[in-house]
Image: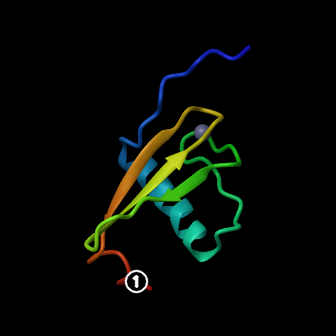
Amino acid sequence: MKEKKKKIKIVTQELMQTAMVQLRKWQANREAELECPNCGAAGLKIKDRSARPHSEWYAFKCKECGLDDAIHIPMASHRSSM
Ligand SMILES: [Zn+2]
């Protein structure tokens, strides 16, 4: 039986950058295999939770390590590199 783990948040710059790489991969291909930015396990889930016209929210979840957080992307800086 598995013990309940603490939820892991995307708090460091390093984690955020790795999360962004996975997010871009997911945006390019919704079927892509994603890796957890925290533990590297396959099966990371990303959910689009954007609700407002000026920002985007993406929820990240990993069942392996308990990563559970959402990152916020302002629209202005987003799309500019695409
Ligand atoms: Zn993980």
Q: Residue at x 55, y 32 (%)?
A: 66
Q: Quadrant of residue 34?
A: bottom right
Q: Position of residue 25 (x, y in %)?
A: 59, 68
Q: Is residue 5 above or below residue 12?
A: above
| Extreme residue in the front direction | 51
Residue at left 63%, top 49%? 44
Point out residue 73 in the picture as x, y percentages from the top left corner.
Answer: 33, 64
Q: Left or right: 62 with respect to 9? A: right
Q: Residues within 10 Å of mark 1 (few under 14, many from 20)?
A: few
Left or right relative to 10: residue 21:
right
The residue that label 1 is drawn on is 81
Residue 6 placement (x, y as % from top left):
49, 23
Residue type at mark 1 is: Ser
Mark 1, secondary structure of its residue: loop
Which residue is depicted at the point 65% across and 73% down?
29
Please give the name of the residue rendered at 43% of the width and 43% of the height, measured from the top-left corner. 69
| 47 to the left or right of 56 | right
Q: Quadrant of ligand 1?
A: top right
Q: Quadrant of the C terminus?
A: bottom left
- Say which quadrant the N terminus sits in: top right
The vertical placement of 1 against 74, above or below, is: above
Residue 53, image quadrant: bottom left
Cβ of mark 1 under 8 A from ligand 1: no
Position in image of residue 79 (x %, y %): 38, 81
